[in-house]
Amino acid sequence: MELAVRTAVAQLGGDLLEGLLLVDGGHRGPHVDCGDGHQARFVGYRDKHLDTVLGPINLHRAYYHCAECGTGVVPRDDEVGVTGVSMSPGLRAMVARVAAATPFAKAAALLAELAGVELSTKRVERSGETDGEALQAGIAARAAAMAAGTVTPLRPTGVIDKLYVAVDGTGVPSVPAATDGRPGKSPDGKAQTREAKLGVVFTQSKLDDDGHPVRDQASSSYVATMEPVATFASLIDAEAARRGSAKARQVIVLGDGAAWIWNLAAHHFPTATHIVDLYHAREHLHELGALVAATLGDDAPHWLAERLAELDRGDINALVAAARGLTLADAKAVEVEKALGYFETNISRMRYAHFRAQGLFVGSGAIEAGCRSVVAQRLKLSGMRWTTRGASAILGLRCEEASGRWDKIIWTKVNTQTSVA
């Protein structure tokens, strides 16, 4: 009975919505600008079938034609946000929400069960990815405008004590066309994934009772892309600027030892405090310990414990000296030297005792959690294979939701927007 009443009410709502839209048929005189400097002539009225949250309706609106361009112009479609699409802005927002949250087939089933809207899996996929792609394009355009100085973000009011920029990359299972010619870790040497680059910006203003740093509640905002580092760098730089990096008392960049992360940090955040995630550093030290374990014999656990203590203090010189003081075979010595390069390269980023004394995070838990919650929980499920376009589009939607910005998306303009609040 409940579902029957809901269906009947939706039908009534659809009739009401259609009637409201008929009040303005979109006639704007005998001629309108076609958008390319010509005048399009009024031809007549045409119907457009539109799926909405309340069911299907017909949009009766004025149609113009530009003889010079050979294209049609429908002002009313632009005004209500349905140019080139067959779903209303409200339904597109709903579809994008479920498409970002769960696999497309399940998203279509949820729409039918919870909202009474019947759409095919393919329509859910196409609509979600199209709007996600448009959203990403708008964010990229804003970042480019900020870099060019043509757009200045409204910075937050109040004092920002510590602003963190955490960056990481994680593999997304991809279709063969997206990985063709790329080396990978599979037995045949071919790549099975493409890297998603994720960044999170958050603030810290206090310590807990034990003196540990605490991330400010609801302060995390995310950007992500499947595009090259240069594109990602502009996105994270713009997001940090939008969040007030220019007025923060201290900016901190957190990442693992990947060279691309620190090249990005050196270029875009040269005056920031750079910190290598302590847990990644420990993993590298355990790998070093495994290399020399056979040489050390029973003393290996004790030797590793001493090196871990040095790492926690940030005494990288002592760690490196202890490793180089071992007598190793030539081949093993080469491997150890290679492993030590990681620590020597990042020595200024591993001053962990100093960083702790300043009340700073030394672990990149925020970005690791983001890799799981923003990327893996949607894009890395069993059997999934993504196109680069599709993965980047869904990532864009998920970042907006994780950042608490979903309600600021203007769905009537999402296909043409150049900025996102």
Image (tube, rainbow, N blue to C red):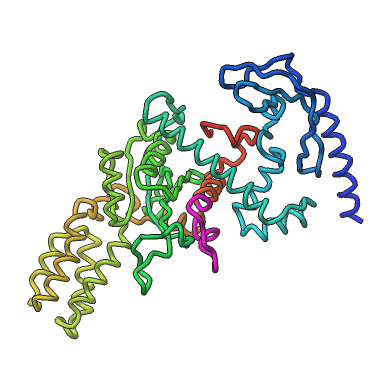
Q: Position of residue 219 (x, y in %)?
A: 48, 43
Q: Is residue 400 left or right of residue 269?
A: right
Residue at point 30% right, 44% down?
264
**Is residue 383 covered in magenta?**
yes
Q: Position of residue 406 (x, y in %)?
A: 59, 42
Q: Is residue 83 above or below residue 198?
A: above
Q: Is residue 267 left or right of residue 7?
A: left
Q: Is residue 215 above or below residue 245?
A: below
The front one of 111 and 57 is 57
Query: Which residues are the magenta region?
Result: 375-391
Residue at point 62% right, 59% down?
103
Residue at point 76% right, 39% down?
50
Q: Is residue 349 above or below residue 151?
A: below
**Is residue 392 covered in magenta?**
no
Q: Is residue 148 left or right of residue 355?
A: right
Residue at point 25% right, 71% down?
287
The front one of 102 and 69 is 69
Q: Position of residue 133 (x, y in %)?
A: 54, 43
Q: Position of residue 151 (x, y in %)?
A: 43, 25
